[in-house]
Image (tube, rainbow, N blue to C red):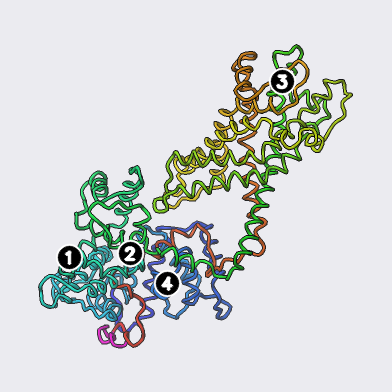
Amino acid sequence: MAQSPQEPLSSRLSSTLKATAGSLTSSVKPAESELARWRRTFERFAKEEIDGQKFLNPSQFIDAIAPTDEGFSKIKREQYGNLFRVADSARRGLVSFEDFVVFETLLKRPDADYQLAFQVFDVDASGTIDFDEFKAVLSANTAASGIPFDFDCAWMKLYVGKRGDRHVLGYHEFTQLIKGYQGERLRQAFHYFDADGDGYINPEEFQRIIVEIAGHKLSDAVLGRLPTLCTLNPGRRISYSEVIAFHNIIREMDTVERIIEHAVKKSKDGRIDISDFLDEAAGSMRYGMFTPMEANIIWHFASRGNAGAGQRLALADFQALLDAKWQPPETASIKQPTTVSGGFLAEAAQSTYNFIQGGIAGGLGAYAVYPIDLVKTRLQNQRSTVVGEVLYRNAFDCIKKVYTNEGGVRAFYRGVLPQLVGVAPEKAIKLTVNELVRKKATDPETGRIPLLMEIVAGGSAGGCQVVVTNPLEIIKIRLQMAGEITRAEGGTAVPRGALHVIKQLGLIGLYKGATACFARDIPFSMIYFTAYAHLKKDVFREGHHGKVLSFGELLLAAGIAGMPAAYMTTPADVVKTRLQSQARAGQTVYKGIIDGLSKISREEGLRALFKGGLARVIRSSPQFAVTLACYELLHKHFPYPYAPAPVVHRPVLSAHQEISRIRARNALRILLDCSSRFGMVDSSTASKRMPLIPKSLR
C-alpha cells in the first residue's frame, strides 16, 4: 500500500514494526511461560520509568540480550546498540515491554540473525532495501577504516541493477548480497593497496584488511602475527592467492576445527602434521577440500611461524587460531583473579580447608558403608575347615546373627572410629600421589598420558597409602572380630578398644600383613584410577566440545570404576584379613601372602579366595559415590569463607534464553563481517557521511 510522502517517518516506522510484530506473533505465538520469563528479564533490567511505565535504556537493553559468557572482547558493548535501534520501534531512545516482546519473538525465528541484520539496513522500515539505504549504512560504518568501497562496481550491479534502472532488495536477495559482500570487499581492498598492480601487498596492508573484515573472528595473538604471513614468500610480500587462502580458512573455521579434532583423536601421540590434516580432510569432506597453501598457512599460525614440512602439532597449538577469545596462559592467569589474593599463606589456608572437607566427606562415605565392611570381614575370616567354624551361610545370615547376638545396630559399627581417623590421610595420600605422578607423566601440550604411566600413577598412590592404612586396617579388623571372639569364649572375654590393640601389637605388629595390603591396594588403585579416568573421557566424553560432566555422571563413573577394582583384588584382601586377624586355637596360621593363597585354595577351594567379594564391591562402589557427593555438597554449601569472590560484571540469566542471545550475537557477526567497526561510528564521522543519506531518511 502506498504511503503518503507527508506522513512522518516515525509513524511509518511504528506502523511497519507493529505489522511485523503482528505477523511474527501469529506465526510464532509465545507460550505463557515465555511471556512470564520475558517479563522477569525486563523487570530485572528496566530502570527507566516514565508515567509509571518502565523502559530499557540502551545500556540496560544490552545487559538483557547480550550473551553472558563471552564478555565484550571481540564484539564491543556499544556494537550491541545496533540491535537496540531495531527494538526501539518508536525511536524514543527507550524500549518498552511491548517492544521487548516483539524483539524476543523475532529472536525465536531460525533466521533471526539475518532478520535483525536486514532491519538494521532497512532504515525506513519499508520492508525492502534500496541502493541508497545500503550505501548509506555501509559508508557510515566503513569510512573510519580508510579502505574505500566502489558501490558502482560490476558485482553490486548484479544485485541491484545499473544506475537509473536499479531495483530494491527484498529480504532473501539481501541475505545473499550480505553473505557475498565480504569477498568483494576483500578483492577491492587488495586492489586498492596493490597500486602498482604487481599482485602483491605489504604485510601491514594485509593486516589492515583482515582486521577490518574479520578482526572479530581471530584472537589477538593471530591478529598480531598477521604480517608474518609474508615469511612464506622469499620476497617478504603477500600475494592475492595467500590473502584468498587465509580468507577461506576464516570462512571454514568450523570445518578446520572439526578436522583437526578428528585427526588428533586418531593420532597415537596426540599430534598431527600437514599430511594428517589433508588426509582427514579428504576423508571427511564430500566435495570441498583444503589446498596445500591453506594447510601451510594453518600450520604457520599454529606453530607461530616455526612450522616445518613435517612438524607435528598438538590440539593446544591450534587454539589461538581456532578460538577468537584465546589468550596466552600467562595473560589469562593475570586477568582471571579480580581480587588480590593473600599470597602463599592464603592459598595454604584454602588448601587446608579443602583437605578438611575431603576428610569429612571421606569419613561420611566410610561411615555409610561400614556395616557392609564388617559383614565382609566376618565372611572372609571364617574358616570352613574347622568344625563349627562356619557361622554364617551368607551375607544376609551374617547380618541377622550380628544384629541378634551382638547388640543390635551398634554391633555393626565396632572399630569405626579408627577407620574414620584414617580416612582423611588415606584419601589425601592416594589422591595427591596419583595426581602428582599423572601430572609429571602428562604431555603438557597434548594433555595425554601413556596408559602405562596411568597404571604406574595408580599403583604409586596405592603403595603410598599403605603406610597409613595398614595400621588402621589391622585395628579395625581386630575390633570387628571382637564380638565374635567374645561370643566364642562364652562372654567371659573383656571387650578391648583400639588402644589395647595398639599396645598388644606394638609398632612393628601394626604392619603385620603389610605385604598383603600392598598386594591389594596397589592393584586396586591401578585398576580404579585408570578405569575412572577412561570412563570420564571415553564413555561420558568429558572435555568433548567443552563438555563438563554432571553430578550424576561423576557419581556413576566413580561407582563403576570401583566395581572391577574391588572384586579383582578380593583374594589379596582375604589373605590380608586372615593375616591381620587374631587366629584362635585350631585355626590355620599363614606365614605370608603366598603361603596364605596356597593354603586357602588347597584347604577351602578357590571360591574361598573370593569370600566377601560381593560385599566388597557393594561397599567400595557406594563409598566412592557417597564420598564424592558429600565433598561436592560441602563445597557448595560451605565454601571457603575468605576466598576472593568472583566479580560478576553482569547478571547471569536463565539458560532458557541462551539460544536467543546466540542469535542476537550472530546478527552482529553478520554486520561485523562488513566491518569490524560496525556500530562504533562517532558523531564526527557520521556527520561527514550525512550527505550520502537520502534527505527523506535523515
Is residue 656 or residue 603 the one in the foreground? 603
Q: Against 74, is 597 above or below?
A: above
* Image quadrant assignment for residue 153: bottom left
Residue drawn at the location 74% of the way across and 34% of the way down: 475
Residue 36 picture location, percent across and down? 55, 61
- Which residue is the site of mark 4? 87
Residue 378 picture location, percent across and down? 72, 25
Dot 1: element:
loop
Gap between marks 3 and 1, in whole Å? Answer: 81 Å
Amino acid at pointer 3: Gln
Q: Nearer the viewer, mark 1 or mark 4?
A: 1
Residue drawn at the location 69% of the way across and 26% of the way down: 579
- Which residue is the site of mark 1? 233
Do labels 2 and 3 touch, CB within 8 Å? no
Do labels 3 and 4 touch, CB within 8 Å? no
Dot 3: element:
loop
The residue at the far top in this view is 387
Q: Against 178, is 463 above or below?
A: above
**Prevailing secondary structure class for the magenta stretch in the rendered image:** helix
Q: Nearer the viewer, mark 2 or mark 4?
A: 2
Q: Nearer the viewer, mark 3 or mark 4?
A: 3
Q: Which residues are magenta?
A: 687-695
Amino acid at pointer 4: Ala
Residue drawn at the location 42% of the way across and 42% of the way down: 450
- Residue 162's disc number: none
Looking at the rendering, in which quadrant would you find the C terminus?
A: bottom left
Marked residue nearer the N-terminal end (3 or 4) = 4
**In the image, residue 605 lies in the stretch drawn in magenta:** no
- Which residue is the site of mark 2? 114
